[in-house]
Image: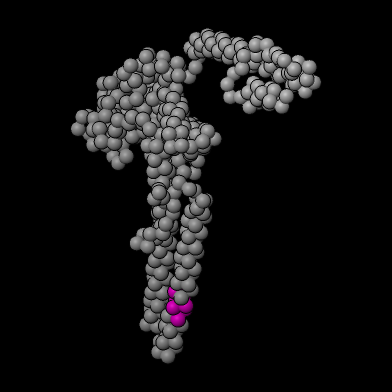
Amino acid sequence: MILGISIVFTLFFAINPIFAQESVDTSEQITLSGDLQNNPVAQDILKKIEKSKRWITQMEQRNFEAQERQKELEQKRAEVLQSLEKDLKKWEELWGYYTFDKMLERTLENNPANNTSTIYDHPLKFTGSKINAGRDALHKVLLEGGGPEEARSAFVNAAKITREEMIYANSLYNVLQNNAYYNQQILFSSSGTFEDSISGKELRKYYQDYRTNPGYLQANPFDKLSWTDLGKNTLDTECRQEHVLVYRTNADDYVCTTEQTAEMWVRHNMGNLVNDTFLESKDPVSITQFKQDRIVKKVNNLNSEINIMQKHYEKKLSDTKIKYNSVFTNLKFEQDGEEKKLIAKFNSNDKMSKKTFTVNILDIQEKYVQLEVNVVDEKLRILELLESQYQTGVHNFVKNYESDSEIKIIWNSQNPVFQAEVPIS
């Protein structure tokens, strides 16, 4: 009896999935034999065995169904992904023509030799260079193990176009499209504004005489006075300072004109420089070079303004000294005149004693000595006032540019005038 129960328990544990590592064939029917058929404990164990077999069968069925569902789900995901890729490809084909890369590609195809054909070419190339710089920065961060946020930040910093860069770029492209002159564009500030106190004089040099303006001459070809008034020179003519000799192709003559007017004539194909010394061929290809030229021009104009202030001060000093030298001369002349009159009176009048004559002469001399002292004091006060006004004017002018990050102003001990210079970076 006990042996039979042990065999049943052994069989139970052998087929129980909790303890068995190998699969069990649950389709095989287990039966009891002999006296075990009437044993209630054996009957109960047999029921539990049958229940476990059904439970195992259900589990295997569920696992099979789950695997089938997973396969179906993966297949649907693959189908959806493939459909999405097709849609994306269709979208790229539909809108790809209008993307920036395609626009730039068409620009390069239209200009294989990088020649300018439309006003959009250079701005597109500039924008493309910024985008490529951003992509390079992004890939560099990723290759070095950086995270997505760091890579995105690197792209933005490298690809962004500042307002200053945009102004510089537009200025350059206006020059390249012959819509502006390079030497005029660098007269404007980094914010695009025009500072008349610094650059107004330079800009006005281009339009001092309407008769020399190419635009006016081309619009008025029958204005003989304008065409012939300046043409009175020969090939050997030496022009005065700040003027150059130009051969005018339209009038077949030689003209001495300002450098700015010569620049306009050359740009409009109306003339050629006889001596190409000042007007070099400028091909502004970089924003960095444009910025440097603009700062240098501003520095030169600032120095010019300071130099004008100094010359004005020196002219006032010279005029003041000449004025008071004339006053001293007049005083000496008046003193000599009074003394001569007194001497003549003394010689013609026997009643005037030598003592009276001496007293009168000393009075005249004392009078003019005091006058000279007063004039000297007045002269010194005027000179001090001029010095104070000059120093105040220079300092007030310089103070306007102390916070300018593009330049610095220093005091040159060998030449008492402020100098504006490009700061050393």
What residue lies at 41% left-to-right and 59% top-to-bottom? 411
Taking 322 as reference, is 238 above or below it?
above
Q: Which residue is at the front of the view, 292 or 260? A: 292
Q: Quadrant of residue 125?
A: top left
Asked whether residue 322 appears in the rendered view, the answer is no
What residue lies at 38% left-to-right and 33% top-to-bottom? 286
Q: Position of residue 75 (x, y in %)?
A: 57, 11
Helix, strand or loop for the magenta stretch, by majority: helix
What residue lies at 28% left-to-right and 21% top-to-bottom? 249
**Relative horizontal placement of residue 258, taking residue 133 as reference (left or right):** left
Q: Position of residue 260 (x, y in %)?
A: 36, 33
**Relative horizontal placement of residue 398, taking residue 254 as reference (left or right):** right
Q: Is residue 369 magenta?
A: yes
How has the structure been colored for display?
A: one colour
> How many labels were placed on the picture?
0
Q: Is residue 111 magenta?
A: no
Taking 145 as reference, is 39 above or below it?
above
Q: Which residue is at the front of the view, 360 or 212? A: 212
What residue lies at 39% left-to-right and 45% top-to-bottom? 300
Taking 233 as reference, is 23 above or below it?
above
Q: Residue furthest left?
A: 236
Asked whether residue 425 appears in the rendered view, the answer is yes
Question: Bounds of the magenta span?
Answer: 366-372
Q: Quadrant of the N terminus?
A: top right
**Relative horizontal placement of residue 65, taking residue 190 as reference (left or right):** right
Q: Position of residue 409 (x, y in %)?
A: 44, 54
Taking 178 as reference, is 402 above or below it?
below
Q: Position of residue 61 (x, y in %)?
A: 66, 13
